[in-house]
Amino acid sequence: MKIFTPLFISIFQSDNLNFYRSLTQNRMNIGVLALQGAFIEHIGILKKLGSAAEEIRLPEQLKDVDGLIIPGGESTTIIKLLKEYQLFHPLKEMGGNGFPIWGTCAGMICLAASVTNSQEVDMETLKLIDIEARRNAFGRQVDSFEVDLDIPALGNAPFHAVFIRAPYIDHAGPKVEVLSRLDNGTIVAARQNNILVTSFHPELTDDHRFHEYFLDIAAAASEIYSMR
């Protein structure tokens, strides 16, 4: 199991990542949690970008990957399956030690420190990013929508985001970097060192910049680990 020490996590800040892309991104092997949800689309994009990609269903598979994507789906089901397949505690430990994890939509809920609007009282999550996430924050499936977002970390061009029964972030702690908001100020993308979350589904668009951004984070983490 790889351990990415927090001592070096400052290099994960956005301004320091471009150096690593050309050197290491094509050597990355990214895992995509494949217990439930839209994992196939993530794998397809990662391969298009030159990264290896692996479906993750068992804890022993984590030792071979440089980062993990938790895709959209149904958050309570994903958490239940993480526990059933004995992935919950290894991911919590690895994420706390700097292992890069990106949660999209339901994946964001799984990573959040706390959750509101949940059917479960005190919903147990991985608690790897200091945010309070609100489930189904925009309403039901019929209330799904698409919008162009300004995301400076990805460059000047807007990012077309697809929201499907999406959560949003009610509150972000002081160590969380807010990456994007809706026009009304609602937080829909954020990062805390090695943990990345998005309310929306980047895998459902032809814009692969968010996947490139996560590969940058994983590449930086891999370089840091190799220097130890």
Image (cartoon, grey):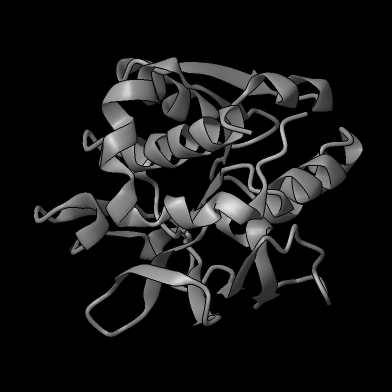
- Which residue corresponds to the image point at 34% horizontal and 15% vertical from the top-left? 50
Name the one closer to the observer, 48 or 195: 195
Whether residue 94 is visible to the viewer of this picture, yes or no, is yes
Q: Nearer the viewer, residue 124 or 27?
A: 27
Residue farthest to the front, as pictured: 228
In the displayed structure, would residue 151 be above or below residue 221? Answer: below
- Answer above or below: position of 139 versus 64: below
- Can you say whether 9 is above or below 226 in the image? below
Residue shown at 39% from the left, 74% from the top: 187
Position of residue 109 in the picture relative to residue 189 (left or right):
right
Q: Residue at x 80, y 24 (%)?
A: 58
Residue 107 visible in the shown view: no
> Where residue 228 sits: x, y (%)?
64, 33
Where in the figure is residue 169, as x and y percent of width and height? 49, 74
Q: Nearer the viewer, residue 188 or 11?
A: 11
On the image, the x and y values in percent for residue 133 come to 58, 72
Residue 121: where, in percent of width, then height? Answer: 83, 77
- Residue 30 relative to residue 124: left or right: left
Q: Quadrant of residue 81?
A: top right
